[in-house]
Image (spheres, rainbow, N blue to C red):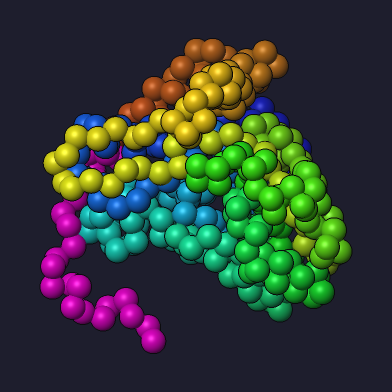
Amino acid sequence: MQELDNDRLVWMFTQMLRIREFEERVKRTFEEHPGVIRGHTHLADGAEASIVGSLATMQPGDQLMATYRCHGYPIALGTDTKAIMAEIYGRKDGLCGGYGGSMHLVDPSRGFMGTSGIVGQGIPQATGLGWAAQLRKQNDVVLAFFGDGASKQGAFHESLNLASLWKLPVVYVMENNNYNVSTRSEQEDANAAAGEPLSTKALAHSMPGVTVDGGDPVLVYETVGAAADRARKGEGPTLVESKVYRLSAHGNIIAPPGVPLHYPEHEAITTFGNREEYEAALRGDPVPRFRARLVEQGALEPAKADEIAGQVREEMDAAVQFALDSPFPEAEAAARTDYVYA
């Protein structure tokens, strides 16, 4: 694991800012361009530090699987934001030709092996990638991202058990964002029975489990990096619980094209009437928090931070316009089998 110099810290801040601004543009699309996004969309604002801190540990040959809350991962890996936005808009110039939409992004050229709308599906797939990596004997590591709700799936336990038995080079990153759709995590009997923190679930599968503040990208980097180093040495998998706070609602409301909409408020407000909790989470927002930290450390000048922010806004302006200008896939393409392999 490499030490983080100032350039790398500024890179991390820039990627966090890019993810946040991208998610804000997706959110604004529902008001500014009604009907453009026609399916479910899930944002990861609030998890930027966890995403970037984890991905900063990756080396050439490493791979990852993610959940349907997936826009931030390819952004941090360098995938063109124009192609990602066009995919979310269902356009032909999208990352997957408009066929995948928000929940099904993939960019194997950058080690981003895909996502799924099915809770927990990526966990066994990442385990399979870990097995392939072990067979290649090139010290590659696989990162598996999933939410706290996925830890109740049988696939979670089956995968961790197998990975532990075979000492597969997988780091399982559970992003605990406090809510399972509209239910608070602490209300879940299954979670309470397993104990807190949720990283204790690792004990059942004879692997290390650690809980980390997912709002601190440096701490996430150190924690996931240590787990990745362990995996590269052939010592097997680790479960990392990264505690974040999702700043947007679970997902958008679907309505017919042309119907004015806004992205709904967070469940803390709409379901539990706890605006104080949400406002406290906003005060702990990891993006401005990390900016202030870098400025205080002398790693980033305020003027440079503002310059980066301006460049990011211009990038996302271009991504939205590109997506709006991109054509839809031809209707007759639905009848072809271009992307059917079996």
Q: How many numbered markers are drawn?
A: 0
Question: In the picture shown, does residue 116 fall above or below 14?
Answer: below
Please state which of residues 293 and 110 is positioned toward the viewer in this rendering: 293
User: Is residue 331 rendered magenta in the image?
Assistant: yes
Question: In the picture shown, does residue 202 fall above or below 339?
Answer: above
Q: Which residue is drawn at 71% across and 57% down?
A: 171
Is 271 placed left or right of 32 in the picture?
right
Q: Residue at x 25, y 55 (%)?
A: 90
Please state which of residues 124 and 157 is positioned toward the viewer in this rendering: 157
Task: Place residue 131 in its image quadrant.
Answer: bottom right
Is 57 placed left or right of 120 in the picture?
right
Q: Where is residue 164 in the image (x, y as percent from the top left)?
A: 80, 69
Whether residue 8 is visible, yes or no, is no
Image quarter hosting the C terminus: bottom left
Please state which of residues 69 and 255 is positioned toward the viewer in this rendering: 255
Task: Place residue 126 in its image quadrant.
Answer: bottom right
Question: In the picture shown, does residue 7 fall above or below 104?
Answer: above
Is 210 placed left or right of 103 in the picture?
right
Stretch of the chain drawn in magenta: 319-342
Q: Where is residue 300 in the image (x, y as percent from the top left)?
A: 60, 19
Q: Position of residue 138 (x, y in %)?
A: 71, 70
Question: In the picture shown, does residue 322 fall above or below 276?
Answer: below
Please state which of residues 272 and 159 is positioned toward the viewer in this rendering: 272
Q: Which residue is drawn at 58% across and 23% down?
A: 277
Task: Place residue 284 in its image quadrant.
Answer: top right
Whether residue 305 is visible, yes or no, is yes
Q: Position of residue 125 (x, y in %)?
A: 58, 70
User: Is residue 211 rendered magenta in the image?
Assistant: no
Q: Residue at x 77, y 44 (%)?
A: 197
